[in-house]
Amino acid sequence: MKDGKGRTFQRPFVSIEDVKTLLEEQNYIPEKEICIATKLSLDLKKPILLEGEAGVGKTELAKTLAKILDTELIRLQCYEGLDQSSALYEWNYSRQILEVRLSELANHTKEEVEKNIFSEKFLLDRPLLKAVKNTTTKPPVLLIDEIDRADEEFEAFLLEILSDYQVTIPELGTIKAVEPPIVILTSNRTRDLNNALKRRCLYLWIEYPSLSKEIKIIQKKVPNLSETLTEKVVKTIQLLRGTEIRKKPGISETIDWATALFALEIDSLTIEVVNETAITFLKNRDDLDLLKDIDLSDILN
């Protein structure tokens, strides 16, 4: 089905400019490289690997893309020790045991019991299987968040899934996606990822936004904040990123701070206000202490 601009579910973006327009309509301000990668990902059916510091908008791209395409967002949050059963599927053992006992009372044969308890109704779908089991031509967005936190063994397993978008369950057979999910992987680069995984993906490194871009983001997200206050907020955050502060504030922290200032009806930024509201953009005790020694006078005055 096409709309008036020639978009279809299989080809939702007709041009790079179209990607930019649709992302901006959802208050996501993209660089051209992001627009190119997004269009190519859908056209070539290839995953996007986004690397960069925490808080630069990697996860937000997946969320925004799901909104634009009006499709489901399936999120797999990675962590150390993540295994296949947590990411792919596992059997509902408690229900299976109950079913076995009921079957024994009903004098079912062993073959009947095994066939029943290993049917799909006892299967617990985890994010990867859920994405692959999609039966429509409108694929979900699969967000594999912070892949660098997972072990290398899981990374190798993931590569197999992304190579053909199918899953083999010994008791049920092979399940293959009707239409491959739109896959976005993010990494904060706490470790180097396997080159094989990188080769499978379109790769982007995302920097913190420029001053003008971040101001534009805040104007989109917190439109009622004054222009002067918005500029001072962004300049302060950008200055802090260049200091020895350990946990650099990302775009989400800038938005949180701007939102808090508006909620508190603050229309002027002073050093006292900065220190009192720093809880919205600094998440470390040492960083809060360090803030008191940073000279913000050029910005605030």
Image (cartoon, helix red, strand yellow):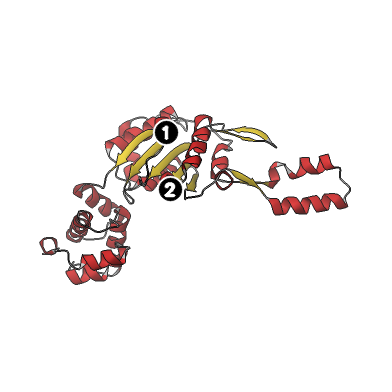
The image quarter in which residue 39 lies: top left
Q: Determine which quarter of the picture holds residue 255.
A: bottom left
Q: Residues within 10 Å of mark 2 (few under 14, many from 20)?
A: some
Q: Residue at x 72, y 41 (%)?
A: 119
| Lateral position of residue 77 relative to residue 129, left or right | left
CA distance for labels 2 and 1:
32 Å
Give the x, y percent position of residue 170. Answer: 67, 36
The amino acid on which the numbered mark 1 sits, given as a three-letter code, is Pro
> Residue 144 location, x and y as percent?
46, 43
- 52 above or below 182? below
Give the label, 2 or 1, closer to the camera.
2
Furthest residue to the top?
44
Left or right of residue 221, residue 41 in this image: right
Q: Residue furthest right?
A: 107
Residue bearing mark 2: 149
Give the structural element (helix, strand or loop) at label 2: helix
Residue 225 is left or right of residue 63, and the answer is left
The residue wearing badge 1 is: 12
